Image (cartoon, rainbow, N blue to C red):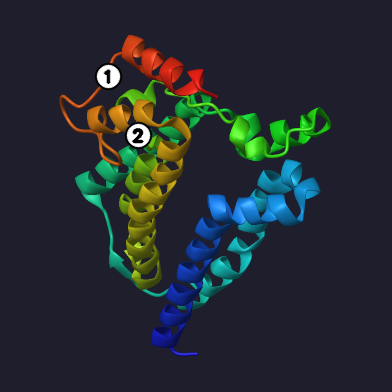
Amino acid sequence: MSVTASLIALGLYFIGYCLLHSFLASRRCKHWCLQHWPALMPAYRGLYNLLAVLLLVPLLWLYLQASGPLLVHWSGWSGWLMNGLSVAALVGFFSSSGDYSMAEFSGSRQWRQRHLGVRDPEQQARLRLGRWHRWVRHPWYFLALVLIWSRSMDAAQLLLSVLASLYFVIGSRLEERKLIEQFGDAYRHYRRLVPGLLPLPGRTISATRAQELEQQANRSL
């Protein structure tokens, strides 16, 4: 397979992966599963994560097939800067993990609570606005953008970086539609105060304001 064909295959697979990932995360798909396979719902999040990981294996294989000489190579002071940004992003992922319910993210909470008779465990989620959420609405997307764009790149990695960036923009908007449906005016107000993907000077909220918005959003659940 030529390099061009490998890049096309890689791009098409990644687009398909993102489309499937977003569809399975959608309220429409979850509602369909709830109607047809209600017993599956406590395991939905765990199976979703498992499938996402397994489908990365063919992506990795395609990436290796399309890899070639570097197009962008950071060296000297720029290399130190970019490596520093990468390390900072990894530290950010670790430090921001406390802003999320990892039990809910992994699906273990939904599975443990299956005996409670909750028809849709996904609806039991609560809005959590941690330290990082006071600066940017999607901290992990922001940190992922820093990480992928601070690496040296060949054509395959550049292609994935562009597509991943587009997916973060589109995916964040799709995700926020669900959050607005679930949390209403509280989340709409939060959106007006805090930027989505890139922190901006003067666009932050205090810990007290974040707590007030949390309480407002979760009060009606």
In what element is the residue under mark 2?
loop
Amino acid type shown at disc 2: Arg
- Residue ranking furthest to the bottom: 1
Distance from label 2 to label 1 (Cα)? 11 Å
Q: Residues within 10 Å of mark 1 (few under 14, many from 20)?
A: some
In this rendering, position of residue 116 left or right of residue 24: right
Q: Which residue is mark 2?
A: 137
Give whichever of 89, 71 is nearer the camera: 89
In this rendering, position of residue 3 left or right of residue 197: right
Which mark is on residue 205? 1
In what element is the residue under mark 1?
loop
The residue drawn where x is 76% and y is 48% is 38
The residue drawn where x is 36% and y is 25% is 186
Which mark is on residue 26? none
The residue drawn where x is 62% and y is 30% is 124
In this rendering, position of residue 114 left or right of residue 60: right
- Residue ranking furthest to the right: 115
Q: Quadrant of residue 81?
A: top left
In this rendering, position of residue 56 left or right of residue 196: right
First in sequence, mark 2 or 1: give its number. Answer: 2
Camera sees residue 53: no
Where's the C terminus, which quadrant? top right
Whole-percent x, y for residue 138 in the image: 38, 38
Q: Check the image and report above or below for 140 versus 148.
A: above
Give whichever of 192, 55 is nearer the camera: 192
Give whichever of 160, 66 is nearer the camera: 160
